[in-house]
Amino acid sequence: MVDEPKWLEMKRHAFEAYTSDGRLDVHELESIVEIGNRDGGFTEDEKLVLINVIANLTRADMTDHMWAKVEELVQKLELEHDSEASIEGVAEDHEDDN
């Protein structure tokens, strides 16, 4: 049996989380991160999936706890360098709320 690539498993997990209730919470995001980090690091494909997951977060998803987690991931994985437009879009939405 061939193992599913982790980036694909991350994407599937995010899809399942959204289809279950239309939202993504911090625990689901952490589960997605754990999938990508199983081998101790993230490939570029796994980072792209994570960037897309973050970019698709809605205002309803963005609790204070979620903002803290997103900021932690952006810094830890240096995601701002991989897709500034996607990450900045989420940050701009947060600034508009304040």
Image (tube, rainbow, N blue to C red):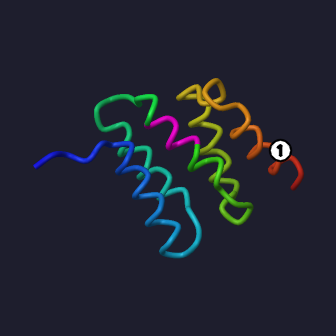
Task: Say if the magenta span includes residue 38.
Answer: no
State whether residue 18 is above or below residue 90.
Answer: below
- Judge from the rendering whether residue 92 lies leftward or rightward of residue 85; answer left or right: right
State whether residue 86 is above or below residue 98.
Answer: above
Q: Nearer the viewer, residue 79 or 85?
A: 85
Q: Residue furthest front?
A: 2
Expressed as whole percent of the image width and height from the top left, the position of residue 15 reads 47, 62
Expressed as whole percent of the image width and height from the top left, the position of residue 90 reads 74, 46
Residues in magenta? 46-51
Q: Nearer the viewer, residue 4 or 75?
A: 4
> Main structural element of the magenta stretch: helix, strand or loop?
helix
Q: Residue furthest left?
A: 1
- Judge from the rendering whether residue 50 lies leftward or rightward of residue 70; answer left or right: left
Expressed as whole percent of the image width and height from the top left, the position of residue 94 reads 80, 50
Expressed as whole percent of the image width and height from the top left, the position of residue 53 reads 56, 50
Which amino acid, mark 1?
Glu
- Residue under the image location 38 percent in, 44 percent down: 34
State whether residue 29 is above or below residue 47.
Answer: below
